[in-house]
Image (cartoon, rainbow, N blue to C red):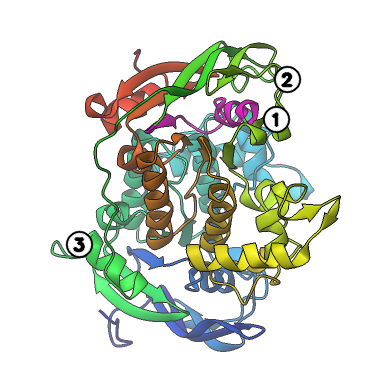
Amino acid sequence: MTIKDTDPPLLLAMRGILKRFGSVLACDHVDLTLRPGDVLGLLGENGAGKTSLMNILFGTYSADAGTIAIAGVPVEIGDSAAALRLGIGMVHQHFHLVGRHTVLENLMVGRVGRHLLLDRSGALAKLAEIEAAYGLRLDPDVAVQDLAIGEQQRVEIVKALFRGARILILDEPTAALTPQETEGLFQAMKAMAAQRLGIIFISHKLAEIRAITNRITVMRQGRVVAELDNSPDLSPRRLAELMCGRPIQPPAKGRASPGATLLRIEGLSTSGSERRRLKSVSVEVRSGEILGIAGVSGNGQRELADVIAGVLPPLSGRLEIAGRAVERPSPRVIQDLRVGRIPEDRMGVGLLTQSPLADSLAMPRLHERPFSRHGVIDRNEVLRFARKQIEAFGIRTPGPLARTGALSGGNLQKALLARELAADPLVLLAAQPTRGLDVAAAQFVHARFLELRSRGCAILVISEDLDELFLLADRIAVMSAGRITAELAIAEATAERIGLLMTGAEAA
Protein backbone atom coordinates (compact mmCIF):
# COMPACT_ATOMS: atom_id res chain seq x y z
CA MET A 1 0.00 0.00 0.00
CA THR A 2 1.33 3.44 -0.95
CA ILE A 3 0.43 6.35 1.32
CA LYS A 4 -0.79 9.38 -0.63
CA ASP A 5 0.17 12.94 0.26
CA THR A 6 -3.57 13.65 0.63
CA ASP A 7 -3.81 11.19 3.55
CA PRO A 8 -3.45 12.48 7.16
CA PRO A 9 -0.10 14.28 7.75
CA LEU A 10 2.95 12.06 7.54
CA LEU A 11 5.42 11.90 10.38
CA LEU A 12 8.18 11.10 7.87
CA ALA A 13 8.40 11.24 4.07
CA MET A 14 11.59 10.18 2.27
CA ARG A 15 11.21 10.76 -1.47
CA GLY A 16 13.47 9.72 -4.33
CA ILE A 17 16.45 8.89 -2.11
CA LEU A 18 19.51 8.06 -4.21
CA LYS A 19 22.84 6.89 -2.81
CA ARG A 20 25.88 5.50 -4.62
CA PHE A 21 29.06 3.98 -3.21
CA GLY A 22 31.37 3.96 -6.21
CA SER A 23 29.72 1.76 -8.82
CA VAL A 24 27.23 0.30 -6.32
CA LEU A 25 23.75 1.86 -6.29
CA ALA A 26 22.74 1.31 -2.66
CA CYS A 27 19.47 3.29 -2.79
CA ASP A 28 17.77 3.72 -6.16
CA HIS A 29 15.15 6.50 -5.88
CA VAL A 30 13.63 5.08 -2.70
CA ASP A 31 10.38 6.36 -1.19
CA LEU A 32 9.56 5.58 2.45
CA THR A 33 6.76 7.02 4.56
CA LEU A 34 5.80 6.79 8.22
CA ARG A 35 2.61 7.92 9.93
CA PRO A 36 2.13 8.73 13.61
CA GLY A 37 1.47 5.41 15.37
CA ASP A 38 3.01 3.26 12.64
CA VAL A 39 5.22 0.28 13.37
CA LEU A 40 6.76 -0.12 9.92
CA GLY A 41 8.64 -3.32 9.14
CA LEU A 42 11.61 -2.73 6.82
CA LEU A 43 12.67 -5.94 5.10
CA GLY A 44 15.32 -6.91 2.58
CA GLU A 45 18.22 -9.23 1.92
CA ASN A 46 21.73 -8.29 3.03
CA GLY A 47 22.83 -5.52 0.70
CA ALA A 48 19.26 -4.54 -0.26
CA GLY A 49 19.82 -0.93 0.90
CA LYS A 50 17.95 -0.91 4.25
CA THR A 51 20.94 0.12 6.36
CA SER A 52 22.08 2.74 3.83
CA LEU A 53 18.58 4.26 3.82
CA MET A 54 18.41 4.39 7.62
CA ASN A 55 21.93 5.83 7.85
CA ILE A 56 20.76 8.63 5.54
CA LEU A 57 17.74 9.26 7.79
CA PHE A 58 19.95 9.32 10.90
CA GLY A 59 22.54 11.59 9.28
CA THR A 60 25.40 9.09 9.07
CA TYR A 61 25.39 9.35 5.25
CA SER A 62 24.27 12.14 2.93
CA ALA A 63 21.95 11.24 0.05
CA ASP A 64 23.12 12.02 -3.48
CA ALA A 65 19.55 13.02 -4.38
CA GLY A 66 16.09 13.05 -2.86
CA THR A 67 14.22 14.86 -0.09
CA ILE A 68 13.26 14.22 3.54
CA ALA A 69 10.33 15.87 5.32
CA ILE A 70 9.43 15.61 9.00
CA ALA A 71 5.76 16.36 9.76
CA GLY A 72 5.48 17.97 6.33
CA VAL A 73 8.52 20.25 6.77
CA PRO A 74 11.52 19.67 4.45
CA VAL A 75 14.71 19.09 6.44
CA GLU A 76 18.44 18.65 5.88
CA ILE A 77 20.06 16.00 8.10
CA GLY A 78 23.81 16.57 7.99
CA ASP A 79 24.77 14.43 10.96
CA SER A 80 23.33 12.38 13.82
CA ALA A 81 23.16 15.45 16.07
CA ALA A 82 20.82 17.06 13.54
CA ALA A 83 18.75 13.87 13.43
CA LEU A 84 18.42 13.87 17.21
CA ARG A 85 17.33 17.53 17.19
CA LEU A 86 14.64 16.60 14.66
CA GLY A 87 13.34 13.83 16.92
CA ILE A 88 14.92 10.86 15.14
CA GLY A 89 16.49 8.17 17.32
CA MET A 90 18.28 4.99 16.25
CA VAL A 91 19.01 1.92 18.36
CA HIS A 92 21.81 -0.01 16.70
CA GLN A 93 22.41 -3.75 16.95
CA HIS A 94 25.63 -2.99 18.86
CA PHE A 95 24.91 -0.68 21.76
CA HIS A 96 26.65 2.66 22.30
CA LEU A 97 26.80 2.70 26.08
CA VAL A 98 29.50 3.31 28.71
CA GLY A 99 29.55 0.13 30.76
CA ARG A 100 31.14 1.49 33.93
CA HIS A 101 28.67 4.39 34.16
CA THR A 102 25.20 4.10 35.67
CA VAL A 103 21.97 4.04 33.70
CA LEU A 104 21.25 7.67 34.62
CA GLU A 105 24.76 8.80 33.70
CA ASN A 106 24.40 7.18 30.27
CA LEU A 107 21.08 8.96 29.78
CA MET A 108 22.55 12.33 30.76
CA VAL A 109 25.59 12.21 28.45
CA GLY A 110 25.69 15.45 26.44
CA ARG A 111 22.86 17.08 28.40
CA VAL A 112 23.31 19.95 30.86
CA GLY A 113 20.84 21.87 32.95
CA ARG A 114 20.83 25.46 34.18
CA HIS A 115 24.19 27.14 34.73
CA LEU A 116 25.92 24.27 32.87
CA LEU A 117 25.21 21.90 35.77
CA LEU A 118 23.94 18.34 35.46
CA ASP A 119 20.23 18.21 36.27
CA ARG A 120 19.93 14.89 38.09
CA SER A 121 16.50 15.55 39.55
CA GLY A 122 15.16 16.60 36.15
CA ALA A 123 16.65 13.50 34.56
CA LEU A 124 15.04 11.26 37.19
CA ALA A 125 11.68 12.92 36.59
CA LYS A 126 12.03 12.41 32.83
CA LEU A 127 12.96 8.76 33.35
CA ALA A 128 9.86 8.27 35.52
CA GLU A 129 7.68 9.81 32.77
CA ILE A 130 9.09 7.40 30.16
CA GLU A 131 8.58 4.43 32.47
CA ALA A 132 4.96 5.43 33.13
CA ALA A 133 4.23 5.98 29.43
CA TYR A 134 5.90 2.93 27.91
CA GLY A 135 6.58 0.46 30.73
CA LEU A 136 10.36 0.72 30.24
CA ARG A 137 11.52 0.26 33.82
CA LEU A 138 15.17 0.87 34.73
CA ASP A 139 17.12 1.28 37.95
CA PRO A 140 18.92 4.62 37.44
CA ASP A 141 21.80 3.79 39.80
CA VAL A 142 22.89 0.42 38.36
CA ALA A 143 26.07 0.28 36.27
CA VAL A 144 25.24 -0.59 32.65
CA GLN A 145 27.88 -3.35 32.60
CA ASP A 146 25.86 -5.17 35.30
CA LEU A 147 22.68 -5.24 33.19
CA ALA A 148 21.48 -8.13 31.04
CA ILE A 149 21.45 -7.60 27.26
CA GLY A 150 17.72 -6.92 27.20
CA GLU A 151 18.12 -4.29 29.91
CA GLN A 152 20.99 -2.63 28.05
CA GLN A 153 18.82 -2.42 24.97
CA ARG A 154 16.12 -0.82 27.11
CA VAL A 155 18.67 1.83 28.13
CA GLU A 156 19.35 2.57 24.45
CA ILE A 157 15.64 2.92 23.70
CA VAL A 158 15.05 5.10 26.76
CA LYS A 159 18.08 7.21 25.77
CA ALA A 160 16.45 7.94 22.41
CA LEU A 161 13.12 8.79 24.07
CA PHE A 162 14.97 10.85 26.69
CA ARG A 163 16.24 13.03 23.84
CA GLY A 164 12.76 13.54 22.47
CA ALA A 165 12.61 10.98 19.67
CA ARG A 166 9.30 10.80 17.81
CA ILE A 167 10.73 8.55 15.11
CA LEU A 168 12.57 5.48 16.39
CA ILE A 169 14.68 3.18 14.20
CA LEU A 170 15.23 -0.28 15.71
CA ASP A 171 17.92 -2.29 13.88
CA GLU A 172 17.62 -6.05 14.57
CA PRO A 173 16.46 -5.32 18.14
CA THR A 174 15.60 -8.91 19.08
CA ALA A 175 18.83 -10.54 17.84
CA ALA A 176 20.14 -11.28 21.37
CA LEU A 177 16.90 -11.29 23.40
CA THR A 178 15.13 -14.15 25.14
CA PRO A 179 11.47 -14.76 24.15
CA GLN A 180 10.37 -13.05 27.36
CA GLU A 181 12.57 -10.00 26.66
CA THR A 182 11.24 -9.85 23.10
CA GLU A 183 7.68 -9.85 24.38
CA GLY A 184 8.58 -7.00 26.78
CA LEU A 185 10.07 -5.01 23.89
CA PHE A 186 6.93 -5.57 21.80
CA GLN A 187 4.72 -4.33 24.64
CA ALA A 188 6.82 -1.16 24.84
CA MET A 189 6.60 -0.70 21.06
CA LYS A 190 2.81 -0.99 21.19
CA ALA A 191 2.72 1.65 23.94
CA MET A 192 4.91 3.95 21.83
CA ALA A 193 2.65 3.50 18.81
CA ALA A 194 -0.37 4.30 20.99
CA GLN A 195 1.37 7.57 21.92
CA ARG A 196 1.68 8.38 18.17
CA LEU A 197 5.39 7.72 17.84
CA GLY A 198 6.54 6.17 14.58
CA ILE A 199 8.78 3.09 14.67
CA ILE A 200 10.86 1.58 11.86
CA PHE A 201 11.55 -2.05 12.76
CA ILE A 202 14.36 -3.78 10.83
CA SER A 203 14.50 -7.55 11.30
CA HIS A 204 15.23 -10.77 9.44
CA LYS A 205 12.79 -12.63 11.73
CA LEU A 206 9.71 -12.72 9.54
CA ALA A 207 7.42 -14.09 12.26
CA GLU A 208 8.28 -11.07 14.43
CA ILE A 209 7.65 -8.68 11.54
CA ARG A 210 4.22 -10.26 11.21
CA ALA A 211 3.61 -10.09 14.97
CA ILE A 212 4.40 -6.43 15.69
CA THR A 213 4.09 -4.27 12.55
CA ASN A 214 1.05 -2.71 10.89
CA ARG A 215 2.80 -1.90 7.59
CA ILE A 216 5.74 -3.48 5.74
CA THR A 217 8.16 -2.06 3.17
CA VAL A 218 10.31 -4.56 1.24
CA MET A 219 13.56 -3.57 -0.49
CA ARG A 220 15.54 -5.52 -3.05
CA GLN A 221 18.72 -4.42 -4.83
CA GLY A 222 18.35 -0.83 -3.65
CA ARG A 223 14.71 -0.40 -4.63
CA VAL A 224 11.36 -0.65 -2.86
CA VAL A 225 9.61 -3.65 -4.41
CA ALA A 226 6.56 -3.81 -2.13
CA GLU A 227 4.59 -1.68 0.33
CA LEU A 228 2.03 -3.76 2.19
CA ASP A 229 -0.48 -3.61 4.99
CA ASN A 230 0.26 -6.37 7.50
CA SER A 231 -2.91 -8.35 6.82
CA PRO A 232 -3.75 -11.79 8.29
CA ASP A 233 -3.32 -13.50 4.90
CA LEU A 234 0.28 -12.27 4.48
CA SER A 235 2.57 -15.24 5.18
CA PRO A 236 6.27 -15.26 6.14
CA ARG A 237 6.89 -17.34 3.01
CA ARG A 238 5.37 -14.61 0.83
CA LEU A 239 7.55 -11.98 2.54
CA ALA A 240 10.64 -14.13 1.95
CA GLU A 241 9.77 -14.44 -1.74
CA LEU A 242 9.34 -10.66 -2.03
CA MET A 243 12.72 -10.11 -0.36
CA CYS A 244 14.61 -12.60 -2.50
CA GLY A 245 12.68 -12.42 -5.77
CA ARG A 246 12.23 -16.19 -5.84
CA PRO A 247 10.52 -18.96 -3.86
CA ILE A 248 12.32 -19.89 -0.62
CA GLN A 249 12.15 -23.42 0.75
CA PRO A 250 13.57 -24.19 4.22
CA PRO A 251 15.97 -27.16 4.28
CA ALA A 252 14.56 -30.48 5.48
CA LYS A 253 16.07 -31.62 8.76
CA GLY A 254 15.50 -35.37 8.64
CA ARG A 255 16.15 -37.83 11.45
CA ALA A 256 19.47 -37.88 13.29
CA SER A 257 21.61 -41.03 13.44
CA PRO A 258 24.09 -40.28 16.24
CA GLY A 259 27.27 -42.34 16.37
CA ALA A 260 30.45 -42.17 18.41
CA THR A 261 31.23 -39.16 20.59
CA LEU A 262 33.56 -36.85 18.66
CA LEU A 263 33.67 -33.89 21.07
CA ARG A 264 33.74 -34.35 24.85
CA ILE A 265 34.28 -31.69 27.51
CA GLU A 266 34.48 -32.65 31.19
CA GLY A 267 34.67 -30.25 34.15
CA LEU A 268 36.01 -27.34 32.10
CA SER A 269 36.74 -24.14 34.04
CA THR A 270 38.37 -20.83 33.07
CA SER A 271 39.37 -17.57 34.70
CA GLY A 272 37.54 -14.29 34.07
CA SER A 273 34.50 -12.38 35.30
CA GLU A 274 31.98 -14.15 37.50
CA ARG A 275 29.25 -14.31 34.84
CA ARG A 276 31.42 -15.20 31.85
CA ARG A 277 34.01 -17.62 33.25
CA LEU A 278 33.30 -21.31 32.76
CA LYS A 279 32.50 -23.28 35.90
CA SER A 280 32.95 -27.03 35.55
CA VAL A 281 31.22 -27.29 32.16
CA SER A 282 30.63 -30.79 30.79
CA VAL A 283 29.07 -31.54 27.41
CA GLU A 284 29.49 -33.96 24.51
CA VAL A 285 28.53 -34.07 20.83
CA ARG A 286 28.28 -37.26 18.80
CA SER A 287 28.83 -38.01 15.16
CA GLY A 288 25.77 -37.18 13.09
CA GLU A 289 24.10 -34.79 15.55
CA ILE A 290 23.81 -31.08 16.22
CA LEU A 291 23.98 -29.79 19.78
CA GLY A 292 22.66 -26.26 20.26
CA ILE A 293 23.92 -24.00 23.04
CA ALA A 294 21.34 -21.42 24.13
CA GLY A 295 21.96 -18.54 26.50
CA VAL A 296 21.70 -14.80 27.00
CA SER A 297 24.79 -13.11 25.56
CA GLY A 298 27.70 -12.88 27.99
CA ASN A 299 27.06 -16.04 30.02
CA GLY A 300 30.13 -18.01 28.97
CA GLN A 301 29.22 -19.02 25.42
CA ARG A 302 32.13 -17.16 23.84
CA GLU A 303 34.53 -18.58 26.41
CA LEU A 304 33.29 -22.10 25.68
CA ALA A 305 33.89 -21.60 21.96
CA ASP A 306 37.34 -20.12 22.58
CA VAL A 307 38.43 -23.05 24.76
CA ILE A 308 37.33 -25.61 22.17
CA ALA A 309 39.08 -23.61 19.44
CA GLY A 310 42.33 -23.54 21.42
CA VAL A 311 42.25 -19.76 21.83
CA LEU A 312 41.56 -19.64 25.59
CA PRO A 313 43.53 -21.94 27.92
CA PRO A 314 41.38 -23.70 30.54
CA LEU A 315 42.25 -23.69 34.22
CA SER A 316 41.01 -27.25 34.67
CA GLY A 317 39.00 -29.93 32.96
CA ARG A 318 39.39 -32.26 30.01
CA LEU A 319 38.89 -31.75 26.26
CA GLU A 320 38.69 -34.75 23.92
CA ILE A 321 38.41 -34.81 20.13
CA ALA A 322 37.47 -38.19 18.59
CA GLY A 323 38.57 -39.97 21.78
CA ARG A 324 41.93 -38.21 21.96
CA ALA A 325 42.70 -36.04 24.99
CA VAL A 326 44.00 -32.60 24.04
CA GLU A 327 46.56 -31.73 26.72
CA ARG A 328 47.75 -28.37 25.36
CA PRO A 329 45.06 -27.00 23.04
CA SER A 330 46.10 -24.36 20.54
CA PRO A 331 44.47 -23.21 17.27
CA ARG A 332 46.96 -25.25 15.22
CA VAL A 333 46.52 -28.39 17.35
CA ILE A 334 42.72 -28.12 17.19
CA GLN A 335 42.81 -27.54 13.43
CA ASP A 336 45.07 -30.57 12.93
CA LEU A 337 42.47 -32.66 14.78
CA ARG A 338 39.95 -31.68 12.07
CA VAL A 339 37.89 -29.24 14.06
CA GLY A 340 36.35 -26.54 11.87
CA ARG A 341 35.48 -23.17 13.35
CA ILE A 342 32.93 -20.52 12.37
CA PRO A 343 33.77 -17.74 14.86
CA GLU A 344 31.26 -15.23 16.19
CA ASP A 345 33.31 -12.27 14.90
CA ARG A 346 33.66 -13.05 11.21
CA MET A 347 35.19 -9.64 10.44
CA GLY A 348 37.66 -9.37 13.31
CA VAL A 349 38.65 -13.02 13.79
CA GLY A 350 37.39 -15.17 10.98
CA LEU A 351 38.69 -13.50 7.82
CA LEU A 352 41.49 -11.24 6.57
CA THR A 353 39.30 -8.28 5.69
CA GLN A 354 42.06 -6.18 4.09
CA SER A 355 43.45 -9.08 2.03
CA PRO A 356 42.23 -10.73 -1.17
CA LEU A 357 39.44 -13.26 -0.74
CA ALA A 358 41.75 -16.01 -2.03
CA ASP A 359 44.10 -15.45 0.92
CA SER A 360 41.21 -15.51 3.41
CA LEU A 361 39.98 -18.82 1.98
CA ALA A 362 43.38 -20.53 2.10
CA MET A 363 44.76 -18.72 5.16
CA PRO A 364 44.62 -21.43 7.88
CA ARG A 365 46.31 -23.99 5.65
CA LEU A 366 48.80 -21.89 3.68
CA HIS A 367 51.62 -23.83 5.37
CA GLU A 368 50.31 -27.14 3.99
CA ARG A 369 50.29 -28.83 0.64
CA PRO A 370 49.03 -28.06 -1.95
CA PHE A 371 49.25 -24.36 -1.05
CA SER A 372 52.96 -24.38 -0.24
CA ARG A 373 56.00 -26.52 -0.94
CA HIS A 374 59.29 -26.18 0.93
CA GLY A 375 58.00 -23.01 2.53
CA VAL A 376 57.10 -21.32 -0.78
CA ILE A 377 53.43 -20.43 -1.39
CA ASP A 378 52.00 -21.60 -4.71
CA ARG A 379 49.83 -18.62 -5.72
CA ASN A 380 48.30 -20.48 -8.66
CA GLU A 381 47.09 -23.24 -6.34
CA VAL A 382 45.65 -20.68 -3.92
CA LEU A 383 43.73 -19.01 -6.77
CA ARG A 384 42.53 -22.35 -8.15
CA PHE A 385 41.19 -23.36 -4.73
CA ALA A 386 39.53 -19.96 -4.24
CA ARG A 387 37.76 -20.07 -7.61
CA LYS A 388 36.48 -23.58 -6.86
CA GLN A 389 35.06 -22.53 -3.46
CA ILE A 390 33.55 -19.31 -4.84
CA GLU A 391 31.64 -21.33 -7.43
CA ALA A 392 30.64 -24.16 -5.08
CA PHE A 393 29.23 -21.81 -2.42
CA GLY A 394 27.80 -19.14 -4.72
CA ILE A 395 29.92 -16.37 -3.18
CA ARG A 396 29.05 -13.07 -4.86
CA THR A 397 32.35 -11.34 -5.55
CA PRO A 398 34.12 -9.83 -8.57
CA GLY A 399 36.74 -12.56 -8.21
CA PRO A 400 39.27 -14.24 -5.92
CA LEU A 401 41.45 -11.12 -5.75
CA ALA A 402 38.63 -8.87 -4.50
CA ARG A 403 39.19 -7.44 -1.00
CA THR A 404 37.54 -9.73 1.55
CA GLY A 405 36.07 -6.88 3.59
CA ALA A 406 34.11 -5.61 0.58
CA LEU A 407 31.82 -8.67 0.66
CA SER A 408 28.34 -8.48 2.21
CA GLY A 409 27.62 -10.24 5.51
CA GLY A 410 25.99 -13.22 3.85
CA ASN A 411 28.88 -13.69 1.44
CA LEU A 412 31.43 -13.38 4.26
CA GLN A 413 29.64 -16.20 6.07
CA LYS A 414 29.60 -18.29 2.89
CA ALA A 415 33.36 -17.69 2.57
CA LEU A 416 33.92 -18.93 6.14
CA LEU A 417 31.86 -22.03 5.44
CA ALA A 418 33.68 -22.65 2.17
CA ARG A 419 37.03 -22.47 3.93
CA GLU A 420 36.18 -24.65 6.92
CA LEU A 421 34.16 -27.28 5.07
CA ALA A 422 36.91 -27.74 2.47
CA ALA A 423 38.94 -29.44 5.23
CA ASP A 424 36.22 -32.09 5.78
CA PRO A 425 35.88 -31.50 9.54
CA LEU A 426 35.07 -34.22 12.06
CA VAL A 427 33.73 -31.53 14.41
CA LEU A 428 32.32 -28.12 13.47
CA LEU A 429 32.13 -25.32 16.04
CA ALA A 430 29.79 -22.54 14.91
CA ALA A 431 29.10 -19.41 17.01
CA GLN A 432 26.21 -17.13 16.00
CA PRO A 433 26.44 -18.53 12.46
CA THR A 434 23.59 -16.51 10.92
CA ARG A 435 23.57 -13.34 13.03
CA GLY A 436 22.60 -10.44 10.77
CA LEU A 437 21.99 -12.65 7.74
CA ASP A 438 18.86 -12.45 5.59
CA VAL A 439 16.53 -15.41 5.22
CA ALA A 440 18.11 -16.77 2.04
CA ALA A 441 21.67 -16.56 3.38
CA ALA A 442 20.60 -18.11 6.71
CA GLN A 443 18.89 -21.00 4.93
CA PHE A 444 22.03 -21.59 2.86
CA VAL A 445 24.07 -21.89 6.07
CA HIS A 446 21.48 -24.16 7.69
CA ALA A 447 21.40 -26.45 4.67
CA ARG A 448 25.20 -26.86 4.78
CA PHE A 449 25.05 -27.76 8.49
CA LEU A 450 22.37 -30.37 7.88
CA GLU A 451 24.41 -31.86 5.02
CA LEU A 452 27.41 -32.15 7.35
CA ARG A 453 25.23 -33.79 10.00
CA SER A 454 24.04 -36.39 7.49
CA ARG A 455 27.70 -37.16 6.66
CA GLY A 456 28.54 -37.87 10.31
CA CYS A 457 30.04 -34.56 11.44
CA ALA A 458 29.51 -33.55 15.09
CA ILE A 459 28.26 -29.95 15.14
CA LEU A 460 28.12 -27.54 18.08
CA VAL A 461 25.99 -24.46 17.31
CA ILE A 462 26.08 -21.56 19.76
CA SER A 463 23.24 -19.16 18.98
CA GLU A 464 21.10 -16.53 20.64
CA ASP A 465 18.40 -17.17 18.01
CA LEU A 466 16.10 -19.81 19.47
CA ASP A 467 14.29 -20.26 16.15
CA GLU A 468 17.62 -21.27 14.63
CA LEU A 469 18.35 -23.77 17.39
CA PHE A 470 14.91 -25.37 17.10
CA LEU A 471 15.37 -25.66 13.35
CA LEU A 472 18.83 -27.28 13.54
CA ALA A 473 19.49 -28.92 16.90
CA ASP A 474 18.85 -32.46 18.05
CA ARG A 475 19.54 -31.42 21.65
CA ILE A 476 19.73 -28.00 23.33
CA ALA A 477 21.97 -27.20 26.32
CA VAL A 478 21.35 -23.94 28.18
CA MET A 479 24.16 -21.79 29.59
CA SER A 480 23.72 -19.32 32.43
CA ALA A 481 26.47 -17.58 34.43
CA GLY A 482 29.17 -19.85 33.01
CA ARG A 483 27.40 -23.15 33.68
CA ILE A 484 25.35 -25.64 31.70
CA THR A 485 22.10 -25.43 33.63
CA ALA A 486 19.98 -27.80 31.56
CA GLU A 487 20.09 -30.12 28.56
CA LEU A 488 16.94 -31.13 26.69
CA ALA A 489 16.13 -33.27 23.68
CA ILE A 490 14.55 -31.09 21.02
CA ALA A 491 11.23 -32.98 21.38
CA GLU A 492 11.09 -31.95 25.06
CA ALA A 493 12.03 -28.29 24.57
CA THR A 494 9.82 -25.25 24.07
CA ALA A 495 10.90 -21.68 23.38
CA GLU A 496 9.21 -20.52 26.57
CA ARG A 497 11.00 -23.06 28.78
CA ILE A 498 14.38 -22.44 27.15
CA GLY A 499 13.85 -18.70 27.60
CA LEU A 500 13.14 -19.13 31.31
CA LEU A 501 16.18 -21.37 31.73
CA MET A 502 18.33 -18.74 29.97
CA THR A 503 17.36 -16.14 32.52
CA GLY A 504 17.74 -18.52 35.47
CA ALA A 505 14.02 -18.26 36.26
CA GLU A 506 13.48 -22.02 35.97
CA ALA A 507 15.59 -24.85 37.31
CA ALA A 508 16.37 -27.83 35.09
Labels 2 and 1: the sequence-earlier one? 2
At 39% from the left edge and 49% from the top edge, which residue is drawn? Answer: 446
Residue carrying label 3: 235
For this view, does 308 lie left or right of residue 272? left
The spot of residue 117 in percent (x, y) is: 76, 44
Q: Is residue 184 visible?
A: no
At 36% from the left edge and 38% from the top edge, which residue is drawn? Answer: 469
In this rendering, is residue 71 above or below 363?
below
C-alpha distance separating marks 3 and 2 = 51 Å
C-alpha distance separating marks 2 and 1 = 8 Å
The range drawn in magenta is 288-308
SS at circle 1: helix
Which amino acid is tagged 2? Arg
SS at circle 2: loop
Closer to the camera in the image, 265 or 123: 265
Mark 2, other Cα within 10 Å: few <14 / some 14–19 / many ≥20: few
Residue carrying label 2: 328
Labels 3 and 1: the sequence-earlier one? 3
At 59% from the left edge and 73% from the top edge, which residue is drawn? Answer: 397
At 35% from the left edge and 67% from the top edge, which residue is drawn? Answer: 36
The quarter of the picture where the C terminus appears is top left
